[in-house]
Amino acid sequence: MSDNIKVALRLRRPLGLESVDSVIARVGTEEKGNTIDIRHSKKVEVKSFQFDHCSTYSEDVGRDQKEIYEQLAREYLLHALDGYNTCIFAYGQTGSGKSHTMSGSAEYPGIIPRLCQELFAVRELYQASDGQTSTHFRIRCSYVEIYKETVQDLLGKGKCRVREKADRTTYVEGLQDFEVFTEQELSHYFNLGNMRRVIGATQVNEQSSRSHAIFSIDIEQQETSPLGHTSKRKSSIKLIDLAGSERVQASKTTGEHLKEGANINRSLSALGRVISMLSKVKKPISIPYRDSVLTWVLKESLGGNSKTCMIACVSPCDYEETMSTIRYATLARNVRNSAMLNSHEISNGKEQVQAMRSQLEELQKTLSRVENQREVEDQMEKIKLTNQFLEARIDEEQKLAANYYHEWVEMSAQRDGLMQLLGGIVRSTQDVQYSQLRTLLKQLKDHSWEVGQKIELYHSEATECIKRSQE
Ligand SMILES: Nc1ncnc2c1ncn2[C@@H]1O[C@H](COP(=O)(O)OP(=O)(O)OP(=O)(O)O)[C@@H](O)[C@H]1O
C-alpha cells in the first residue's frame, strides 16, 4: 500500500525565560483545521501552514500527552498489529519537546511508554477475546543510538555496523535484541537504554539528547484457527527521538560540544536531503541514504516498507528555527512510502487440510475394523451367555441332589429320633414308677425314723421313770 509520510506538528508551551508576549506561533482553531500560524516579530504578515495533524498546549500537561498518543501514535501500534512496519520520529530544534513527546517523564509519560503499555493490553485482549482463534505473541526489543556517526547498542556491547541485505534493506549487525513477556520488562529495557544515552546541556536545554535514539519493538503474531490453520504476521515499530538541531552561532558552543553539534547537524542535513529527493514527483534513481548513518539505518522508514509518522516539534518563540522545522516538515509530507503487509509466512491451510483428510481416512479404517471386531464380540457374548445359563442349570441340579440327600439324612435322623423316643417312652414309664417307689420308700424310711425316735424317747423316758422310781 502506497501512502505518504504523515506529518504532525506539535507546538511546545513557553518555558523559562520565554514570555507569552514573544510567542510567534499559534495553532489554528478547530474550524481552520490542522494549521499553524507563524508571525515574525518585526513583520505584520502571518504565514499559515497545514499539516496532517497539529497540536498545541493547554494548562493540563498530562492531558496533552494523552491526546498526542491517542490522536496520533495509537494508529501506528494498530498498523503494526495488522502486520505493517511502522515508524514514528520526532524532529525539531534542541529544546523543542522531542524527548517530552517520545519518552516524557514518570509524571507525564510520552508516546513510547504509552505504546508499550497498550501493546501488552492489546495482547491480553487478543488472547482472551476469541475462544476460537488462539494468538501467540513474540515481542522483542532493541535500542541503539547514533552518536558522532557511530551506532552504539544501548542494551548490548558497544559499537555496531550497519549492513545491507540481499533484498537491499539495511540492518544493524550484531545488535542484541531481547524477548519480553511483560510491559514491565519492555519498559525496563527502554529505561536502561535511556540511562546509557549521551546527554549534555545546550543553551536551551539542560538535559539535551546528544544522539539520535532508535527504540525498536519487533512483534510476531502466530494465529491458529480451530481447524489448525496457522498464519504469521511480523512487524517492527521504530520509535525515534532525534538529536536536536542547533544554530552554532546562537548556541555559542565550543570544543567537544561544537563537534557534537556539527555531527548532529550533518546527519540532520543528510536526512533533509533524502526527504527532499524522496518528495520530488520524479524521484532520482539514487537516493543518498549512505550519506549518513542515520539515513542508512532509516532507509526502510523513509520511502520504503513502512508506515511512517514525523512529529515536527517547534518552540513557540524561535522564528528562525521554527520556520526551518516547518520547511523540513512540509517537504516530508510529499514522501511516499510503500508499506507492505508482512504476512508472507501465512500458510493457506492446504497442508493442514491434506493432513486432516488422511487422518480422517485412517479413522474410517479403524472404525470398520472395530465394527468387524464388534460382530465377533457379539457372538462371543452370546456363547458366554449360553455357558453361563448351562453352568447355572448344573448348579441347580447339584443343589437339588444335595437337597434330596439332606432330606434323606434328615428323615433318617427323624426315624432314629422316633426309635429313641419310643425307647425313651418305655424307659421313662419305668423311671416314673421307680421314683414313686423311691418316694414311698423314702416316706417309709422317714416314718420309721420318726417311729424309731419316738421309741427311743419313750425308752429314755421309761428309763428315767424307772430310775426315779428306784431312787
Ligand atoms: N509540551 C510541553 N509541555 C510542557 N513541557 C514541555 C513540553 N515540551 C517540552 N517541554 C519541556 O521542555 C524541556 C525541553 O524539552 P525536551 O527535552 O523534550 O526537548 P528536546 O527537543 O528533546 O531537546 P534536545 O534535542 O536538546 O534533546 C523539558 O524540560 C520538557 O519537559
Image: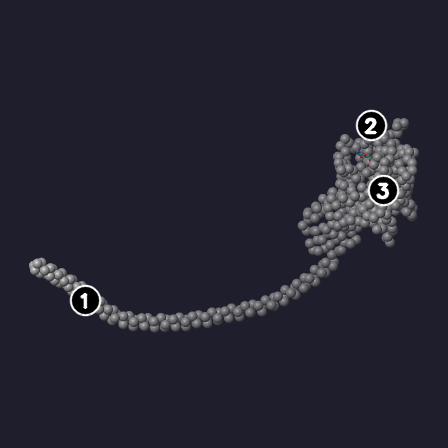
Mark 1 Cα shell of 10 Å, populated few (<14), some (14-19), many (≥20): few
Residue holding disc 2 = 20
Label 2 element class: helix
Q: Earlier in the sequence, mark 2 or mark 3?
A: 2
Looking at the picture, tell me which residue is in the foreground, 321 or 351.
321
Mark 2 Cα shell of 10 Å, populated few (<14), some (14-19), many (≥20): few
Q: Residue at x 53, y 69 (%)?
A: 384
Query: On the image, which quarter does residue 199 sit in?
Result: top right
Three-letter amino acid code at disc 2?
Answer: Val
Q: Which mark is residue 212?
A: 3
Viewer-side label of 2, 3: 3
Three-letter amino acid code at disc 1?
Answer: Leu
Classify residue 285 as left or right of residue 378.
right
Ligand 1 shows up in the quarter that is: top right
Mark 3 Cα shell of 10 Å, populated few (<14), some (14-19), many (≥20): many
Viewer-side label of 1, 2: 1
Q: Is residue 194 above or below residue 427?
A: above
Q: Earlier in the sequence, mark 1 or mark 2?
A: 2
Residue holding disc 1 = 441
